[in-house]
């Protein structure tokens, strides 16, 4: 067996299952889950129709590079969304959702050979983080450095707390904007700092932007490629962005997205994926072309989230330290008493509401787990269900004042 598998940590939802094992739940209340960030709004009918019409594509092997029409649809979306002009043939690559692409890029980029001192290379990850970052790094044979978010700075990552000796071993940095779980968006000034560090130390930047189309203010979130272009880095050197249809178009089961950026990275990434067998189904490609070409359903989807958060957030603000995020569909709340694991377990037992302990989404680093004392709530269900969950949370806290 691959010995690196033993380095993997249990996934947050496996830890949650273990936490709830044997808990006696209030039988008078139906279960409501705010635990998993899986979109539950209806899939637009025109996407389903495009998928159905393309069943003939099942008769052929799809190309790993994707159909030129799909790459062009992705390029056209980047132009409309970010005012970017990328070469669809060399700077864009369709992928089976951002999750598999994030994992695969690390395997492509990392040189696992130890340095002259026998030390492994490093991947720098936000903390808290999406656990695929850590798993990809571990299975690539690297160490992971967890750069903490800072609540006082809108959960910005404190890049200055990464020691120079860590940067010298760093081969890849994950940036998540809008962030999971915090919802924070990386501003241009922070992108400039990340690019300067990349120029100094030579690492690749993987910019995870799968929540970019769910936002609560008039100005859409800044993307990594957009920031690079504004800062005069039009070759997007050492930068790859990841985006997906899952949240934007409510099609998580389609597993469809694309990566874009530095052509010098896209080329070996395509080679890796060719051997990995990562080609996207022709049916999914056809539906993806339809989805990337339409914005009206995205506007309507965003309006649903805005209404939902506008109704739910004030209810929770009355009892929790929580506020409307920049973007995404999570609320990242500090809990009374500071024990996120106990809070999640007791809430589940007494009110049959599932939330995810924040400490499950982070690692202890520099003597502190930055997820400790917080919970992540995914407001993915319909508004009425999320409101009912929020009201139960209020009742739970009021009935457990010393929680």
Image: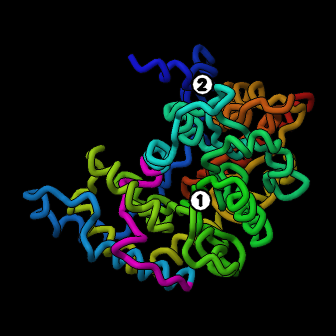
Residue 307 shows in this picture: yes
Left/right placement of residue 246 relative to residue 360 reads left
Numbered-mark total: 2
Which of these two is toward me, 273 or 307?
273
What element does badge 2 sit on?
helix
Point out residue 160 in the picture as x, y percentages from the top left corner.
85, 51
Closer to us: 183 or 228:
228
Where on the picture, by quarter, is residue 310? bottom right
Q: Which residue is mark 2?
A: 15
Q: Are marks 1 and 2 in contact (CB under 8 Å)?
A: no
Q: Which of labels 1 and 2 is toward the front?
A: 1
Which residue: 42% across, 20% down? 2
Left or right, 212 with respect to 185, comes to: left
Spot the residue most to the top.
Answer: 22
Does 92 appear in magenta? yes
Q: Earlier in the sequence, mark 1 or mark 2?
A: 2
Q: Position of residue 312 (x, y in %)?
A: 72, 58
SS at mark 1?
strand
Instruction: Tell me how far mark 1 sits from mark 2, CA to CA.
Output: 27 Å
Q: Which residue is mark 1?
A: 207
Q: Which residues are magenta?
A: 83-101
Residue 105 in the image, given as x and y percentages of width and height = 47, 49
Looking at the image, residue 119 sits to the left or right of residue 341; the answer is left
- Colour option used: rainbow
Q: Residue at x 67, y 25 (%)?
A: 349
For residue 85, above or below residue 17 = below
Screen quadrant of the C terminus? top right
Establish if 321 lies above or below 292. Answer: above
Residue at the image point whose x is 50% and y is 35% from the top: 140
């Amino acid at each position: 067996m691959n010995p690196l598998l033993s380095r993997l940590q249990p996934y947050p939802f496996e830890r949650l299952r273990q936490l709830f094992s044997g808990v006696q739940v209030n039988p008078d209340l139906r279960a409501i889950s705010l635990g998993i960030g899986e979109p539950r709004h209806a899939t637009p009918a025109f996407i389903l129709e495009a998928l159905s019409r393309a069943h003939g594509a099942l008769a052929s092997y799809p190309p790993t590079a994707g159909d030129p029409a799909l790459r062009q649809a992705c390029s056209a979306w980047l132009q409309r969304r970010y005012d970017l002009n990328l070469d669809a043939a060399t700077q864009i690559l369709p992928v089976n959702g951002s999750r598999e692409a994030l994992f695969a890029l690390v395997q492509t980029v990392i040189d696992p050979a130890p340095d002259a001192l026998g030390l492994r290379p490093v991947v720098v990850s936000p903390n808290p983080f999406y656990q695929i970052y850590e798993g990809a790094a571990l299975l690539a044979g690297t160490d992971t450095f967890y750069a903490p978010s800072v609540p006082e700075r809108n959960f910005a990552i404190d890049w200055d707390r990464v020691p120079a000796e860590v940067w010298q071993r760093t081969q890849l940095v994950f940036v998540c904007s809008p962030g999971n779980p915090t919802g924070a968006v990386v501003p241009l000034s922070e992108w400039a700092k990340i690019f300067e560090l990349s120029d100094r130390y030579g690492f690749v930047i993987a910019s995870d932007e799968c929540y970019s189309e769910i936002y609560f203010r008039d100005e859409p979130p800044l993307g990594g490629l957009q920031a690079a272009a504004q800062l005069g880095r039009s070759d997007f050197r050492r930068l790859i962005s990841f985006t997906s249809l899952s949240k934007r178009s409510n099609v998580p089961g389609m597993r469809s997205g694309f990566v874009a950026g530095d052509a010098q990275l896209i080329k070996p990434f395509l080679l890796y994926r060719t051997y990995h067998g990562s080609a996207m189904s022709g049916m999914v490609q056809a539906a993806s072309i339809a989805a990337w070409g339409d914005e009206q359903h995205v506007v309507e989807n965003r309006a649903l989230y805005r209404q939902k958060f506008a109704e739910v957030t004030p209810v929770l603000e009355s009892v929790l330290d929580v506020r409307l995020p920049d973007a995404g569909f999570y609320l990242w709340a500090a809990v009374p008493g500071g024990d996120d694991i106990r809070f999640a377990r007791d809430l589940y037992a007494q009110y049959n509401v599932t939330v995810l302990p924040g400490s499950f989404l982070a690692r202890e680093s520099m003597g502190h787990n930055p997820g400790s004392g917080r919970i992540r709530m995914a407001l993915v269900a319909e508004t009425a269900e999320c409101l009912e969950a929020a009201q139960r949370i209020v009742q739970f806290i009021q009935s457990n004042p010393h929680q």
